Image (cartoon, rainbow, N blue to C red):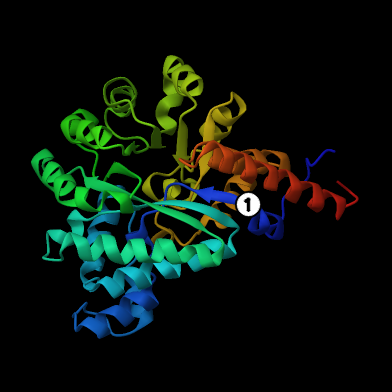
Amino acid sequence: MSTAIVPTAAFVAGLPKAELHLHLEGTLEPELKLELARRNGVDIGQSTVEEVRATYEFDSLASFLGVYYPAMDVLVTEADFYDLATAYFRRAAADGVRRVEAFFDPQAHTSRGVPIDTVILGYHRAAVDAAGLGVSAELILCFLRDFTAESALATLRSALPYADRFIGVGLDSDERGNPPAKFAEVFALARQNGLKLTMHCDIDQVGSIDNIRQVLEEIQVDRIDHGTNIVENPELVTLVRERGLGLTCCPVSNSFVTADMKAVEMVALLHVGVLVTVNSDDPAYFGAYVADNYLALAEKAGLDTDELAQLAKNSFQASWLPEAEKRAHLASIDSYVDAFVAGNPAA
């Protein structure tokens, strides 16, 4: 049965999907930031939601990070981390998300005196409770690449006693002058401890292709975050397709970091069989959760429901779920699309 019709917001919201590129700290909505500041007696320099929202302005990766990290000062207790993650999981469930593999940045908190167990335990408790919302959730511990490799190694070692509470490790923050190879030792140790590996290869960075090559050939990651600059090298495109590695793309955030959503590149990769996925990145700051990102990409690239369903399937195939669970989710997408088409005779 053909499903190649124009997608609606209702179709996208109900479409079962996984979100694989989501920073929990990037879900800090102005309302919650203000609430946590008051709860913890943190002076953030704003006293109304409108004033907080006005600070969420930036026009590049560097200016975004300049807003992003200071906002985290309001996160102090285990309950704060739990509340932040729970608010996101509720929002994700409303967007049809059935699986989340979410990033968190412990160094952004330990560097200001918050114990790492406070961070991990708060987030993990929320991930466990997300099952009550119909969301299977796991955590990915990310290292800040503009910190030293020694700091990353110390962070991993301090986190390993809690390794049953996160599924993998990642690498994020400012890519300039901080190539993947800088963190080869810490990622090797993570692999030895049974953790999955992923790394950010942000769009249009200096040395983008070299960094993508490093993550594939030297680090040998299990997934690449962003990574759409890979279109510049057909050999690397072939490599990720043959390995079945997902690219966790973020259309709306791309349009903030550069002038381009990268829709053309994402669709080109999708059409040659690369596991392109759609995600929201830091939705509180970019104003778009995952369903909004699906719709934005569909509008920009003229995608139909067949193509969005394939993106949703890719999200489960690129996830770190067991194969049997992946198959169950893929079947749920087919059932959902069939029911949608049956209810739309014009399809």
Crowding around mark 1 (Cα neighbors within 10 Å: few <14, some 14 to 19, many 20+) is: many
- Residue 42, position as x, y percentages in the image: 19, 80
Q: Is residue 88 left or right of residue 76?
A: right
Query: What residue type is disc 1 on?
Result: Pro
Q: Can you say whether 88 is above or below 238 in the image?
A: below
Please name whichever residue, 280 or 256, is drawn nearer the observer in this view of the structure. Answer: 280
In what element is the residue under mark 1?
loop
The extreme top residue here reads: 235
Task: Choose top left, top right, bottom left or bottom right for residue 212.
Answer: top left
Q: Is residue 239 left or right of residue 211?
A: right
Quadrant where the N terminus is found in the figure: top right
- Residue 186, position as x, y percentages in the image: 18, 36
The residue lying at 44 percent from left, 33 percent from top is: 228
The residue identified by callout 1 is 16
Task: Choose top left, top right, bottom left or bottom right for residue 272.
Answer: top right
Task: Choose top left, top right, bottom left or bottom right for residue 33.
Answer: bottom left
